[in-house]
C-alpha cells in the first residue's frame, strides 16, 4: 500500500534561522562596541533616564547594547527570537559581570504590560516581515511594554541613502573564509545574498529588509499610542537628512 504523501515542512523565513548560525558571527562579528556606546550616550542625552530605569531591548541579538546599558546601572532585559543569540548574550553578560535578563521571544508577541521605562529596538532589528500587520503587531507589543510617558527608541537604516549608495557586490576575507555579498532592491526591500567559501566550505544565506521611512514609522506609532518626539541621523545626534547613515527615532507613549 502506498504511503500517503507527507505535508511539506513550511519554509522558515530567513530571520528565523540565520541568527542562530555560527556563520552569522563570521560575517558580523566585527561590530563596534564604541558605536554602541555612542548610541547609548544619545539615549541618555535625549531621554535622561533615572538611575535604575527599566530598559527592554527588543531584538537584542547577542546583547551588545543591553550589556552596556546594564553596565551603566540600568535594569535591563533583552529579548530575541534567536536562541543562539540569547545564549551568547548571557555568556557575554556573565563575562562582563553585569546582570541582564535575556529571554527568547518574538517581537510580535507582548513581552509584558507596562514593565519598561524605555524600549529599544536597535541596529535595524526591524523590517524583516513580509506584511504590515506583522510590523504593527511588533510596534504594538513594544508600546504595550512601556509605561505611559515611556520612550521607544528605534535605530534603523536610512532607506534613501541605501538606494543612492547601494554597493551591488563586495568581497572580503575573514579567518580564511571568503565572504561575498550581493545586494539588490526589489518590491520596496533590500535583499542580500551572502556566500561563504573556503577549501572545505561553500554556503549561501539570505537577508531581506523593508526600506521603511520616517512616515512609515510615524504611521505605525500613531496606531499604537506613540508620538514621535525626535529624529536623528547618526549616533552622535546629528540631524536626519537624506544623506544620514542612520534613522534614529525617539517616540513617547501617550496613554
Image: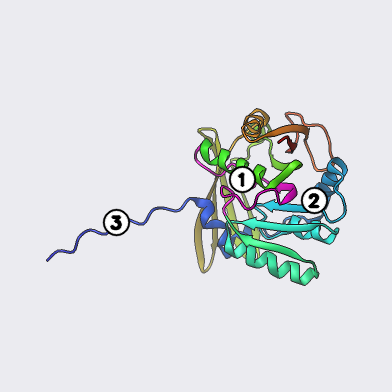
Asked whether disc 1 touches disc 3, contact meaning CB atoms under 8 Å apart, the reply is no
The mark lying in front, picked from 1 and 3, is 1
Q: Position of residue 84 (x, y in %)?
A: 59, 65
Q: Which residue is mark 1?
A: 141
Closer-to-camera residue (208/111): 111
**Secondary structure found at label 2:** helix
**Secondary structure found at label 1:** helix
Rendered view: 238 above or below 194: above
> Which quadrant of the structure image shows residue 173?
bottom right
Closer-to-camera residue (105/53): 53
Q: CA distance from mark 1 to mark 3?
A: 32 Å
Q: Is residue 127 magenta?
A: yes
**Secondary structure found at label 3:** loop
Closer-to-camera residue (188/218): 218
Q: Which residue is mark 2?
A: 35
User: Residue 7: which disc?
Assistant: 3
Amino acid at each position: 500500500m502506498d504511503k500517503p504523501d507527507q505535508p511539506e515542512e513550511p519554509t522558515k523565513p530567513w530571520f528565523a534561522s540565520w541568527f542562530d548560525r555560527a556563520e552569522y558571527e563570521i560575517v558580523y562579528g566585527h561590530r563596534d562596541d564604541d558605536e554602541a556606546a555612542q548610541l547609548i550616550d544619545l539615549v541618555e542625552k535625549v531621554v535622561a533616564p533615572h538611575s535604575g530605569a527599566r530598559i527592554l531591548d527588543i531584538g537584542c541579538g547577542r546583547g551588545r547594547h543591553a550589556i552596556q546599558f546594564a553596565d551603566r546601572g540600568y535594569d535591563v532585559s533583552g529579548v530575541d527570537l534567536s536562541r543562539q543569540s540569547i545564549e551568547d548574550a548571557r555568556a557575554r553578560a556573565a563575562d562582563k559581570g553585569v546582570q541582564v535578563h535575556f529571554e527568547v521571544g518574538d517581537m510580535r508577541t507582548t513581552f509584558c504590560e507596562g514593565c519598561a521605562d524605555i524600549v529599544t529596538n536597535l541596529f535595524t532589528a526591524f523590517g524583516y516581515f513580509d506584511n504590515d500587520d506583522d510590523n504593527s503587531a511588533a510596534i504594538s507589543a513594544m508600546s504595550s511594554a512601556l509605561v505611559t510617558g515611556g520612550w521607544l527608541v528605534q535605530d534603523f537604516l536610512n532607506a534613501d541613502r541605501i538606494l543612492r549608495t547601494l554597493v551591488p557586490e563586495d568581497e572580503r576575507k575573514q579567518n580564511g573564509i571568503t565572504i561575498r555579498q550581493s545586494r539588490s532592491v526589489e518590491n520596496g526591500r533590500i535583499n542580500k545574498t551572502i556566500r561563504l567559501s573556503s577549501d572545505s566550505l561553500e554556503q549561501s544565506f539570505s537577508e531581506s529588509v523593508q526600506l521603511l521611512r520616517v512616515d512609515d514609522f510615524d504611521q505605525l506609532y500613531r496606531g499604537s499610542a506613540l508620538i514621535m518626539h525626535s529624529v536623528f541621523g547618526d549616533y552622535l545626534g546629528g540631524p536626519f537628512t537624506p544623506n544620514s547613515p542612520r534613522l534614529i527615532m525617539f517616540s513617547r507613549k501617550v496613554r
